[in-house]
Structures are given as structure tokens and as C-alpha cells.
Amino acid sequence: MSSKLNGLDREASEKYWIAQLHDAKQGNFPPRRSAPAVRSLTKTIALHQSASSSLSPMINATVLRAAWAMVLARYCDTDDVCFGASVSGPESMSAPVVVPVRLRLEPQQTVAEFLRDVRAYASGVVPHEQFGLQDIIKLSEDARVACDFASLLVIHTEGRFVAPAAMTGCSLVVHALLRENHVVEFSATYDSGSLADTQVTALSHHFNRVVQQLLAPGEAETLLRDISLAGPWDVQQATVANRDVPEAVDDCQTD
């Protein structure tokens, strides 16, 4: 017989998380340190919006989770990523809960198909999100590995942010604030001993770049393999770097 507490079917949740996190691997980005030194960075991302429709918070959250998964996949050189994400708990809870997000990316998959997968994952988690991260960790070694994530994605709307209890311990916490004018304010709290300031700046631009591509008109049938992290900012950085390279001097001497 299933054990139920406050409407949660614990046996069903155990089976769900064991199956969901089977054979999960820990990503290598960002690297972990035992004694992090914390810094923060804030960037603003303007979400593309078609003239005929508005973007609901649910769609925005789906796109942001999908974009973060794609960025991690490229940074970790893998098609199977795990990261933490905050979800709103019942009104009786004082803070959001954190759940592991495990997504698989197929290079031949279209943007539309991947976004559907991300939405389906979010919907599937709902009955099991209150199981608790500490209890998920105890279910299996795979679950422990999956929950030892180095990055946490926190998506919230204006005036509704409450820090999840599990924010500490991650090398990188990404905040995405959804504003009413379809702008996302991106901020990151990170371990400056694991990540250089320039790395986090680049990360914010790459995240922005992927978000814009996922939302662009006509991109629904684009394959994931054709979504590029590099954009105008990377070209600008390369141009500046090449400009600063000193000219070669021919110091060969002839007899």
C-alpha cells in the first residue's frame, strides 16, 4: 500500500525519481570547490515577442529552462544534463523547493520538439516535487549524483521572489526575473574561485543568445544542433583580442 502524507504518494514519488534519474551523470561545469568565494553579476535580456501574441510566464519558464539546458550541454560537451531548479510549493510553504532537472538533448531534435519535452518534464514533476531533495538523494547513487548539481536555475516574476532553501552550496546560481514588459533580468551568483568574471559574462551572453534563437519566429523547426551559442558579442571579443595581438618582428640576422 502506498504511503501518503499531505496528498503526496511517497511510493509513487520514489519510483518516479528513481526512474527519472537512472544513470544520471554529474556535469563538469561549473567546477566545484569546498570553500567558495561569492560574487554576483547582473545582465538584462530582452525576450523576443511576436506582434500577434504575448508570452505567458509558463512559456517563458519553459524557454529559459530549455536554454539553460542547451548552454550546459555545450559547456559540458554532453547530451544529458542535470541541474537544479526552483519550483513554487504550496501556499503553506515559506520558500520554493528545489528539484533536479534531468534533460536529454538530441541533435536531430527540433526546437519545437525539445520545448515540448521541457514542458512535459515540468508537468510530470508536479505530483512529486514535494518529495524533498534530501529524500531524493537517498533513493540511489544515481539520484545522489544528479542532485549534487553545481548550478541552480531560479525563475520568478516581479514581487514574488523568495530564495529557495537549497541555494547555498552551488558554484553558480542563475536568477531569471520575468518582468511584465517581456524582459528577463539575468543575474548570477557564483564562486569566483571556480569561475572567472569573464566566464560568467560570456555565459550570460551565450544564455541570451540561445533564448533569442528559441523564441525567434520561424525557428520552431530548427534542429538543436544548429542553435549556436556564439553571436555578435563573441565576434566583438575575438576582434578586440586580435587587435591586441602584437605584430611579429623579424629579428633574424644575416651573416
Image: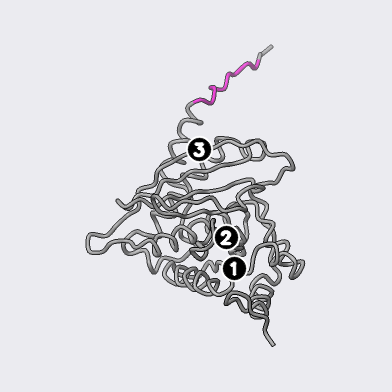
Gap in Å between the C-alphas at discs 1 and 2?
A: 7 Å
Q: Residue at x 47, y 35 (%)?
A: 237
Q: How many labels sit on residues?
A: 3
> Residue most toward the right?
141
Q: Which residue is mark 2?
A: 97
216 drawn magenta = no
Q: What is the chief secondary structure element of the magenta stretch?
A: loop
Which quarter shows the N terminus?
A: bottom right
251 drawn magenta = yes
- Which secondary structure lies at badge 3? strand
Q: Give the number of the disc on residue 130.
A: 1
Q: Residue at x 22, y 59 (%)?
A: 51
Which range of residues does the magenta coloring cover?
244-252
Q: Amino acid at mark 3?
A: Leu
Gap in Å between the C-alphas at discs 3 and 2?
A: 24 Å
- Verify CB contact (< 8 Å) between mark 3 and mark 2: no
Q: Compared to 63, does 173 lie above or below?
A: above
Q: Earlier in the sequence, mark 3 or mark 1?
A: 3
- Verify CB contact (< 8 Å) between mark 1 and mark 2: yes
- Which secondary structure lies at badge 1? helix
Q: Which residue is mark 3?
A: 41
Q: Residues within 10 Å of mark 1 (few under 14, many from 20)?
A: many
50 horizontally vs 177: left or right: left
Q: Residue at x 59, y 19 (%)?
A: 250
Mark 3 against mark 2, which lies toward the viewer? 2
| Snapshot quadrant of residue 135 | bottom right
233 horizontally vs 102: left or right: left
- Which one is nearer the viewer's eye here, 244 or 103? 103
> Residue most toward the top?
255
